[in-house]
Amino acid sequence: MSQPNVLVFYPKVFWGGGPPRTCYAICAPWPGQGLPVTVHTAAYPHADPARIMAPALPMVLPRRLQRRLASVARLRPILERRSVAQAVAAVRPGDLCYFWPGASQEATGATEAARARGGRIVVEFINTHSAYAKRILDAECDRIGAPRYPQFTEAMLGREAERLRLADAVFAPGPFVETSIRETTPACPEILPASYGTYLPSGPPVQRTDRPAGRPLRFLYVGSVSLRKGAHVLMEAWRRAGLPAELWIAGKVERHIAAQDLRDRFLGRIPDTVRFLGHVGDITQVYRDVDVFVFPSLEEGGPQVTYEAAAYGLPLIVTPMGGGWIAKDGANAIVVPPADSTALAEALVRLHEDDDLRRSLGAQALADAPYYGWDQVADRRRRALLDFTGA
């Protein structure tokens, strides 16, 4: 059987970070690995060295004009619908139609249209199934007296169930994603092996040596300051630990708790040893400047920040959700139960006090990270698609 052709449906604007960057990282190596792919999107105001992008907004326009037009609220839905229409029109029998989340494609029935043209439907699941996530987050919100997440509506749960009903296969990028789909979906599509990954640091491998004399140990959390990612558990654990160390937090406060009274109730007293960095555009230097990575997430798909931290040789303190595929308790990480501030505080103290353990966990994380470099991640996904199609 000949190689299938992959058509990616991603009808949003590719602003560069988050899921768009992930999608490009996965798909960009495929042509060089022998798998043709075209990514249909609303707009892509960036360089496209892999030459895989097919945006509805023409790339021949000056990039500054592309960004300006893509920012016009009234124009975006038009570009999204045009992107979906172009992708559907390109489908030929046997093509793999690879759907990333996007409201406009659901509203326009793109999945059904692609299937009617002979396409086979593969769906990307970025996080755990929304019904599974809702159970976890509702319970935690109720436990601490926070408002529940508003997006988990019956309509959202229905859309997710419909996505799975129409799918032939699903990429589940983390162990709990696969579990969540199997537990919530009676007629489960084929689940393809997958992970997310990281761009590996350029230059020689990162060498973790003793920190400069007099500098306190630095712990780093990367992600939105949110209940979903366990920021409140981390803050409580940090107060319990009472370490002569620093906690750096790179990320914005989530809109869900952005009101000052909610934020104060959610995070509690902020010790002077906590440093809020806000959103960091280029996190690479921050990874180099700290000593331990901590990520006590309650709900995740494939936590890319954990793969990134490992690539910089940082020992990991994570929950099972926050560890993804890479974290192995006792080998490169200390894995703690979710929402357990006592266990998390003990892990913080342990790595603060045990230099040898910190070095050994970090060295193993660094050794494990190349398996999750984007080229290898992309190649494993390519092979999973070929196995699925029998090519």
Image (tube, rainbow, N blue to C red):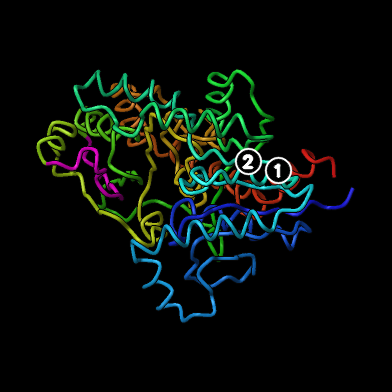
Which residue is labeled 1 in the image?
116
The extreme left residue here reads 261
Could you say which is closer to the camera, residue 41 or residue 112? 112
Q: Is residue 143 above or below residue 170?
A: above
Q: Amino acid at mark 2?
A: Glu
Q: Does 176 appear in magenta? A: no
Which numbered dot is residue 36? none
Q: Does 251 appear in magenta? A: yes
Q: Amino acid at mark 1?
A: Ala
Residue occupying image coordinates x 39% and y 51%: 210
Q: Is residue 354 left or right of residue 214?
A: right
Return the x and y of residue 119 as percentages of the image width and height.
72, 45
Location of the C terminus by quadrant is top right
Which residue is labeled 2 in the image?
112
Query: Around disc 1, counting alpha carbons within 10 Å, would you say few (fewer than 14), some (14 to 19), or many (20 or more)?
Result: some
Q: Is residue 38 above or below residue 137?
A: below
Q: What residue range appears in magenta?
A: 243-259
**Mark 1: secondary structure:** helix
Task: State the image quarter where residue 269 is shown.
Answer: top left
Return the x and y of residue 327 as percentages of the image width and height.
52, 34
Could you say which is closer to the camera, residue 105 or residue 52? 105
Q: CA distance from mark 2 to mark 1?
A: 6 Å
Q: Are marks 2 and 1 in contact (CB under 8 Å)?
A: yes
Query: Around disc 2, counting alpha carbons within 10 Å, would you say few (fewer than 14), some (14 to 19), or many (20 or more)?
Result: some
Return the x and y of residue 26 as percentages of the image width and height.
61, 53
